[in-house]
Amino acid sequence: MTSVEPGRRLEATEEEVAYWVERKRDRVAKGEKVFTVEDLHAYQLDEDETWELVTEGNGCMLSWVAEDGSPGGTYVKHAVLNGAAYMVVLDGDEAIPALRRDPRVSVVFDGGDGVGAVTIRGTVEFVDDPRAFVRVLLAAGRREGLSDEQLAQRLRAARPGRECILHLKPERFVTFTHKKIVRG
């Protein structure tokens, strides 16, 4: 995580904004290729890199649509089993009733500093199988680096019915990596 020096000004002045807008206009007028947010193809991950980041990444943020239409989000533990992503959501999280009503989600998997991120848009399905519950908890614990003893404690403390397993069904992937940016 990037830290900001105490007292450092973060907001841009009107002069700074005007300077950068004019500079970009000049470059476009000269016919130079100007980086735009719409043109990120060169910085995308391939399919293998995408699943590696999802599997090995630091964690993920699950976003959903609340009943009033506002966005909701929560950090969740996750695991990849047999090429499918699963997430653990705790009872009491407002995501559960929202996702039972509308299973559409956006999940951002963080690859850490300089690696990038993967956003998966799709739907989730609640998994009620007790064996799948244990498999996902074990895989999520191993992904976090828990020891065998810690995994055993985690499973003893597990609360089926109070913890929900969500199976992510991807419809669209949006990927980005900092590793492919050429710095001059």
Image (cartoon, grey):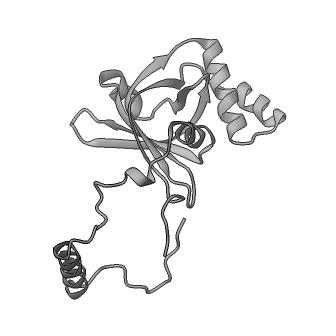
Q: Which residue is drawn at 39% across and 33% down?
A: 95
Q: Is residue 69 above or below residue 176?
A: above
Please give left or right for residue 25 compared with residue 83 in the image.
left
174 or 68, which lies in front? 174
Q: In this view, does 166 lie above or below 10?
A: above
Q: Where is residue 19 in the image (x, y as percent from the top left)?
A: 22, 85
Q: Where is residue 36 in the image (x, y as percent from the top left)?
A: 28, 62
In terms of image quadrants, where is residue 94? top left
Please give left or right for residue 31 compared with residue 85 in the image.
left
Q: Where is residue 61 in the image (x, y as percent from the top left)?
A: 46, 44
Q: Is residue 27 above or below residue 90?
A: below
Q: Which residue is drawn at 72% across and 32% down?
A: 154
Q: Which residue is drawn at 49% across and 46% down?
A: 45
78 or 116, which lies in front? 116
Please give left or right for residue 51 compared with residue 30 in the image.
right
34 or 18, which lies in front? 34
In terms of image quadrants, where is residue 71? top left
Image quadrant occupied by the N terminus: bottom right
Q: Can residue 157 be seen in this view?
A: no
Q: Can residue 125 be seen in this view?
A: yes
